[in-house]
Amino acid sequence: MKSLTRRFSAAPEGTATLFFIQIFATLGFAVLYSTLVLYATKHLQLSVKEATTLMGVFGAFNYGLHLFGGYLGGRFLSNRNLFVGGMALQVMGCACIAGGSLALFYVGLALFLTGSGLNVTCINMMLTQRFTPEDPRREGAFLWNYAGMNVGFFVGFSAAGYFQATQSYSSLFIFATIGNFGAIVLASIMWKTLADRNTGLLEATPQQFRLRQLAGIAILIGLVPVVWLLLQRPGMTETLVKAICGVVALTLIYLTLRHPDRRERRNMTAYLILTVGSLMFWSLYQMAPSGLQLFAVNNVQLLVGGVSIQPQWIQNINTVVIVVGGPLLAAFFVRMRGRGWNIDIPRQFAASLLLMALAFLILPVGIKLAGGDGRSAFVWLFASYILQSLGELLISPIGYAMIGKLAPRQYQGVMMGSWMLVTGLASLFAGDFSGMIPSPNGTTAVATNPGYAKLFAELGLGSLLVGIALVVLNPFLRKLITDKAEVTAEEAPTPAGPAAVVV
């Protein structure tokens, strides 16, 4: 505890507050993320295909709205206002889902997704605003914040597994409601500490500020029925989200090519390349609550040492690795860089994809060694989650911290949101991949194992190829990512001119 206090005392004001807020803010999402497919199939009696498609749309909305959240928070409502407003929608959403009917489920899901989709960018922006671009403590702060998020995941997953054993879904969603309300209480107590810094909204006149606040509230409320309507048509929604992602990608490419500052343009180019690697990683990672969860329930031996492991508890393999490994990795990086080791962003991204490849390639080995009933030993799935979690540590918090380093000031909110939008697109791809798995209904693990083995092998090889490509591109990416201002040949000073021209 003294170490934690000492660590936060050296960080900018508000860093510790955001760490604890993150824990409570994550609870509702952890419950829905880990339980949605099981709740939809076991309680609402939806088919496996309908449930996995809904899970893909759930991720797409949750992460896809992050892009708009960065814009709405920075220019209309302020990040702290939008965060609290979004949490209020999550509280109402969980309360509706606790009602237990299909109609209330869709209403609650629309409320929850609107809130969680918009406010996650806000908490990351509030954190990144507390550091200057060159502050070396930024990466460590995001790793700690990521650890706080995973404390929330651990509690949420554990509670979900406990209530899953008796299928007490109503009590589970009431628990999520109370947890999310805790985030609102903490934010209210530390309201002044969480004030926005260096955003476009702060430059508005008092009249402009009031008008933007009203517009922001109207947008926040108006999005709920839109999300509700799109949830009724998941196929159309999936196509729409993919089209939006394509437009955003083209817009970022255009902004990069037209950006006047050469150094910032090179950094933005590196961002675009690393985004491709991120898309591959998250497309496989997002299979955990859908395809991998169904594989665990139907094709893995979950009775270990006399203990029946609930599906949601498997997700806690990830949270333990993140909570324990995040701070350790932050300390390790500081020590190694102090000794002159070049542990840079491109290398971390390449390593994460190679770890993800190995995580999927070992699953067919476990299937090959399965017992007579066709169920793989739990150790193979356990090892897969360990490898995925190590890869996540290298790519996710580093990706958030990278925005502050690579994004020009005027694009920080959009680029932070775009980075999260990639995860939303990956969720749709994960749903597509999960839709390729054999249906477990009316069949056995022995019969479905070949389909699983083929799918996991193909996905693992895909991640391996992208990881190798990033290894090859590492020297090029390191040249693009630079903190030094450059001088072009046309701008070079003459002997009689100024000593330097900074672009």
Image (tube, grey):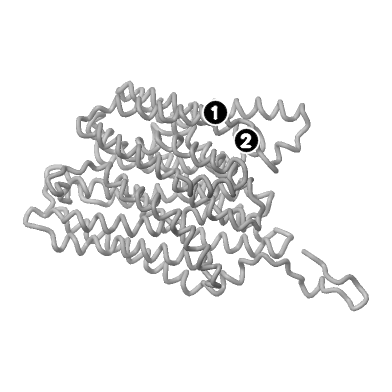
Observer-nearest of 154 and 167: 154
Q: Of tags 2 and 1, which is closer to the observer?
A: 2
Observer-nearest of 328 and 500: 328
Observer-nearest of 386 and 135: 135
Q: Residue at horizontal 71%, vertical 26%?
A: 210
The residue to which callout 2 is attached is 193
The picture places residue 153, in percent across and down from the top left corner, at: 38, 41
Residue 413's label in the rendered image is: none
Q: Is residue 111 visible?
A: no
Labels 2 and 1 touching (C-beta < 8 A): no
The picture places residue 501, in percent across and down from the top left corner, at: 82, 67
103 to 197, vertically: above or below? above
The picture places residue 502, in percent across and down from the top left corner, at: 79, 65
Q: Earlier in the sequence, mark 2 or mark 1?
A: 1
- Dot 2 falls on a residue whose secondary structure is helix
Q: Is residue 191 visible?
A: yes
Left or right: 176 with respect to 88? left
- Outermost residue on the bottom side: it is 495
334 to 107, vertically: above or below? below
Kindly identify the amino acid type of the residue bearing the numbered disc 1.
Gly
Q: Quadrant of residue 265?
A: bottom right
Q: Residue at horizontal 62%, vertical 29%?
A: 216
Q: Badge 2: few (under 14), some or many (20 or more) residues near its Cα, within 10 Å?
A: some
Left or right: 149 with respect to 188? left
The residue to which callout 1 is attached is 85
- Outermost residue on the front side: it is 2
Query: Which quadrant holds the N terminus?
Result: top left
Q: Residue at horizontal 37%, vertical 55%?
A: 389
Kindly identify the amino acid type of the residue bearing the numbered disc 2.
Thr
